[in-house]
Amino acid sequence: MISAITNALQGISKEWVTIIIAALPVAELRGAIPVGLMMGLSPAKSFFLSVLGNSIPIIPVLFLLEPVSNRLRRFKLWRAFFDWLFKMTMKKGDIIQKYEALGLMIFVAVPLPMTGAWSGCIAASLFKIKFRYAFPAILLGVAIAGLIVLAVCMISKDACYAFLK
């Protein structure tokens, strides 16, 4: 998946490729940091650009998810999609339900599938966490996840490649 995205972005600078991959819900910074490193960016630059890219969708998603999903849920296909998406997020949301913003930060900080900024925004909406608490919690979680991914990539190339699968 990541290689297909990277191939589609050929001709764009390494920096922009890293930012774009980080902003996508399928990869986020778990994919962007390894890609940035493989393209020759420094660890610091890969980290910074990945956190920046992963942070771009946070504000729009926090403000627009609920009204957009409510409108689209009138259609059977979209209702099924949002029901599935919200169900998947709720399954992993025990920590958020218990600790609210702190739990949201921890949820986003764990660099596993379905636990990044996009899922954090969905969880914040589902658990009705106010923007003033959700935004910094998600942002801090993104930065922590970035540090974890970068550390893993610096320790082991094989483990770094695992983030791309």
Image (spheres, rainbow, N blue to C red):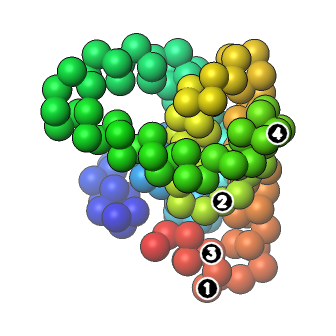
Which numbered disc flags the more N-terminal residue, 1 or 4? 4
Quadrant for residue 123, please give it: top right
Q: Which residue is mark 1?
A: 158
What's the residue at 34%, 64% (across, down)? 1
Q: Is residue 48 left or right of residue 116?
A: right
- Residue 140 horizontal side relative to residue 111, left or right: right
Q: Residues within 10 Å of mark 3 (few under 14, many from 20)?
A: many
Residue labelled with disc 2: 111
- Which numbered disc flags the more N-terminal residue, 3 or 4? 4
Is residue 81 positioned above or below 58 on the image?
A: below
Q: Are marks 1 and 4 in contact (CB under 8 Å)?
A: no
Q: Hey, what amino acid is under mark 1?
A: Asp
- Residue 19: % across, % down: 53, 42
Q: Give the total of numbered labels.
A: 4
In the displayed image of the protein, which residue is found farthest to the left? 76
Q: Earlier in the sequence, mark 2 or mark 1?
A: 2
Quarter assignment of residue 98 = top right
Q: CA distance from mark 2 to mark 1?
A: 16 Å
Q: Nearer the viewer, mark 2 or mark 1?
A: 2
Q: Distance between the Cα atoms at labels 3 and 2? A: 12 Å
Q: Would residue 87 be seen by someone viewing this image from the given angle? A: yes
* Label 3 – label 4 distance at C-alpha: 30 Å
Q: CA distance from mark 3 to mark 1?
A: 5 Å
Query: Considering the numbered disc 3 on the image, is that residue within a helix, a strand or a loop?
Result: helix
Residue placed under numbered mark 3 in the picture:
160
